[in-house]
Image (spheres, rainbow, N blue to C red):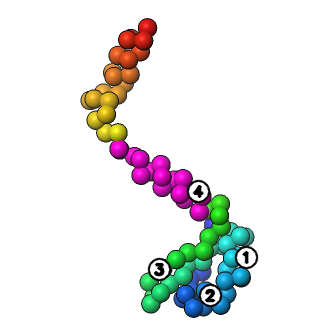
Amino acid sequence: MRATRTLGLEEGRKQLPQLAALAHAGEGSLLTKHGKPYAAIVSPDLLVKSRRKSALLSLRGTGKGLWGKSAAKYVAELRDDWS
């Protein structure tokens, strides 16, 4: 994604068609309310990528301890049981 432009909500409302076209072309826009980030207009591709990435990262570490102290040892034991 190219550089992000920043503008207030009211200005963003007035320029929505142009901002949508820019987002489609890969240039996102950050909308602010009272000077603080409030929303963003980005391409659907970027939104999907960010959701996938954050979904995977949110799973990181959730299985800690599930396989005992050594996951490799546990899997080896399972393989021995199945043989």
Number of callouts in the render? Answer: 4
Residue plotted at (44% across, 83% down)? 36
Which label was assigned to residue 37? 3
**Residue receiving disc 4:** 49
Magenta part of the chain: 47-62
Left or right: 71 as drawn, with respect to 25? left
Q: Earlier in the sequence, mark 3 or mark 4?
A: 3
Asked if residue 2 can be seen in this view, the reply is no
Task: Give the secondary structure at mark 2.
Answer: helix
Tell me if residue 44 comes above or below residue 55 in the rendering: below
CA distance for labels 4 and 1: 19 Å
CA distance for labels 3 and 2: 15 Å
Left or right: 67 as drawn, with respect to 26? left
Find out whether the residues at labels 4 and 1 contact each other: C-beta distance under 8 Å. no
Find out whether the residues at labels 3 and 4 contact each other: C-beta distance under 8 Å. no
**Residue receiving disc 2:** 13
Asked if residue 63 can be seen in this view, the reply is yes
Q: Earlier in the sequence, mark 1 or mark 2?
A: 2
Task: Give the secondary structure at mark 3.
Answer: strand
Q: Name the amino acid, label 2.
A: Arg
Find out whether the residues at labels 1 and 2 contact each other: C-beta distance under 8 Å. no
Crowdedness near tag 2: few (<14), some (14–19) or many (≥20) residues, C-alpha within 10 Å:
few
Tell me if residue 70 comes above or below residue 80 in the rendering: below
Of discs 3 and 2, which sits in the foreground?
A: 2
Tell me if residue 44 comes above or below residue 27 in the rendering: above
Residue 38: give x, y in percent of width and height. Answer: 48, 79
Q: Earlier in the sequence, mark 4 or mark 1?
A: 1
| Rendered image quadrant of residue 8 | bottom right
